[in-house]
Image (tube, rainbow, N blue to C red):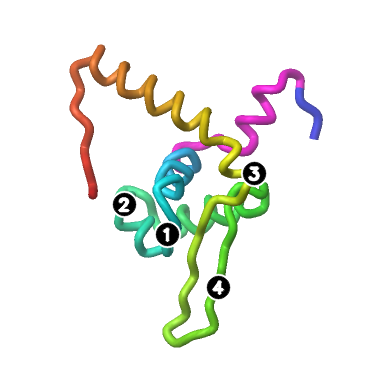
Amino acid sequence: MAYNIPVEATLDVIGGKWKVVILCHLDKGDKRTSELKRLMPEITQKMLTQQLRELEQDGMVKRTSYDQVPPKVVYSLTDYGWSFKPILDAMCNWGEQHMKEKDMAPILTH
């Protein structure tokens, strides 16, 4: 794919409502699908699966499947995914400032 400016390449990987949120949760540690779903109650299971697959295809997330009953699948950031951490941190910092500016309180799901 050809991009006119570099930010298009970035948005191609992290575009959409949920990918950055998923990356933020994985920044705190490896997660099973059910853990991610619990942390993001507004996302549908179908959308979560789709977003995780796209992040995996783009090399940002690693899917590890364990051969056990019941099946266990864990998602984690790859080295490439970790390279995005400074941008995640900047986005979180900006978001905090934005929420203060708009007098908004975060909804904590933990």
Please determine whether, in this image, residue 75 is positioned above or below residue 98: below
Contact (Cβ within 8 Å) of mark 2 with mark 1: yes
Where's residue 77, x and y in %? 54, 51
Q: Which residue is mark 3?
A: 80
SS label for mark 1: strand
Separation (CA) of disc 2 from disc 3: 23 Å
SS label for mark 3: helix
Span highlighted in magenta in the image = 4-18
Q: Mark 4 or mark 1, which is nearer the start of the sequence?
A: 1
Where's residue 100, x and y in %? 23, 17
Q: Which residue is mark 1?
A: 31
Q: Which residue is mark 4?
A: 65
Contact (Cβ within 8 Å) of mark 1 with mark 4: no
> Which residue extends farthest top?
101
Viewer-side label of 4, 3? 3
Answer whether residue 8 is magenta in the image: yes
Viewer-side label of 4, 2? 4
SS label for mark 2: helix
Q: Which residue is mark 2?
A: 39
Q: Quadrant of residue 15?
A: top right
Contact (Cβ within 8 Å) of mark 4 with mark 3: no
Q: Mark 3 or mark 1, which is nearer the start of the sequence?
A: 1
Q: Is the N terminus in the top left, top right, bottom left or bottom right quadrant?
A: top right
Answer whether residue 58 is magenta in the image: no
Separation (CA) of disc 4 from disc 2: 21 Å
Residue type pointed to by label 2? Leu
